[in-house]
Image: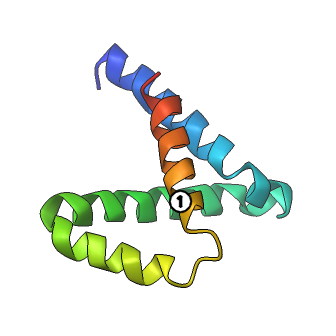
Amino acid sequence: MKASDDAQWAQYGRALIDSMSEVLAETPENIHANLLETADYWLSLGLVLGLRDPDQARQLLQVIEAHEAERGELERDATSLLGQVFE
């Protein structure tokens, strides 16, 4: 990784931790690393799905959002995460 890649990776890590702050505050510290690794995996998986097959990814998101109390929350969280990583 280049220095700029390292810096962007660090920004991503901080953004991921920040976006999970509520979850981390409610869980024992000894499992935080596992929670963050799991979140990173699922975020990466979602990005791959979205790039490989955007139509199916959109359908899957609609299925997930159908069971969300606040559909706009995912949009706001996504915007926040991107803003923190690419600021």
26 or 2: nearer the viewer: 26
Scheme of image coloration = rainbow
The residue furthest top is 3
Residue 67's x, y, as percent?
A: 56, 84
Write the residue at 49% across / 54% down: 75
Per the image, the residue denoted by label 1 is 74
Res. 56 image quadrant: bottom left
Instruction: Left or right? Give the position of 40 relative to 45.
Output: right
62 or 85: nearer the viewer: 62
Res. 70 image quadrant: bottom right
Residue 23's x, y, as percent?
A: 75, 60
Helix, strand or loop status at disc 1? helix
**Vertical side of 9 occupied by 67: above or below:** below
**Vertical side of 84 occupied by 2: above or below:** above
Instruction: Left or right? Give the position of 12 relative to 52.
Output: right
Residue 32's x, y, as percent?
A: 71, 57
Write the residue at 64% across / 47% down: 19
Instruction: Left or right? Give the position of 59 relative to 75.
Output: left
Which amino acid lies under the numbered mark 1 shown in the image of this protein? Leu
Write the residue at 63% across / 62% down: 35
